Image (cartoon, rainbow, N blue to C red):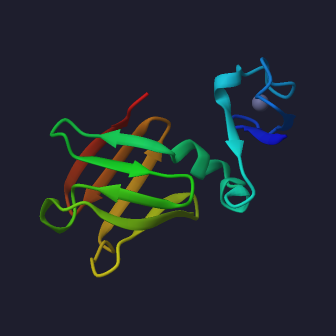
Amino acid sequence: MRKYKCSICGYVHTGSSAPECCPGCKSPASKFIGQNDIINDIIEDKKIISMVGKWVNDRGQFYVFSEDGKFMTNVAKGGATVMGTYMFVDNMLAISVPGYDVSGRRYVVNGDDLDIIVGGEHTHYKKQS
Ligand SMILES: [Zn+2]
């Protein structure tokens, strides 16, 4: 038996697969995310569930966010892919990359849109479906 959590309303279903239709909000099975014990605590945070996936801009730069609170990008450190961590602080996405200063950046998430603002510059990323 596994646990499946509705990413829309948070309803948790236990069984061999996700339910066809969420009893809480009527969302389809595709909105359910399977959980295992290790990541349970982290994906209890609904915002992190909605963040999981690949986010790309029109120059082919990307961020890949995973369920365990880590991300990869080809933006920082001269194009090398680096691994850092992300979390939400006061409803804002906050990322951390060891040895790299990201303190002057703002990460604004709104649905499938991610905007990274550095100084006056603004880069838009879209979540890939
Ligand atoms: Zn639901």
**Residue situated in front as seen by the camera: 20 or 47:** 20
Quadrant position of the N terminus in the picture: top right
Q: Residue at point 15% right, 40% down?
A: 59
Residue 36 appears left or right of 118: right
Q: In this view, which residue lies farthest toward the bottom?
A: 99
Classify 12 as above or below 66. Answer: above
How far across and down, in percent of the image, does residue 47 sit?
60, 50
Residue 108 visible in this rendered orientation of the protein: yes
The residue nearer to you, when weighing 83 against 107, is: 83
| Residue sitting at x 77%, y 29% | 17
Q: Number of callouts in the render?
A: 0
Image quadrant of residue 97? bottom left
Report the residue at 38% width, 32% height from top. 128
3 left or right, relative to 99: right
Q: Quadrant of residue 102?
A: bottom left
Quarter containing ligand 1? top right
Front residue of 97/81: it is 81
The answer, for residue 7, to whether it is visible in the render is no
Q: Quadrant of residue 117?
A: bottom left
> Is residue 123 depicted above or below 31 in this figure?
below
Residue 44 left/right relative to 71: right
Instruction: Point out residue 82 in the picture as x, y percentages from the top left corner.
Output: 29, 65
Position of the C terminus, as image quadrant, is top left
Identify which residue is drawn at 66% across, 48% down: 46
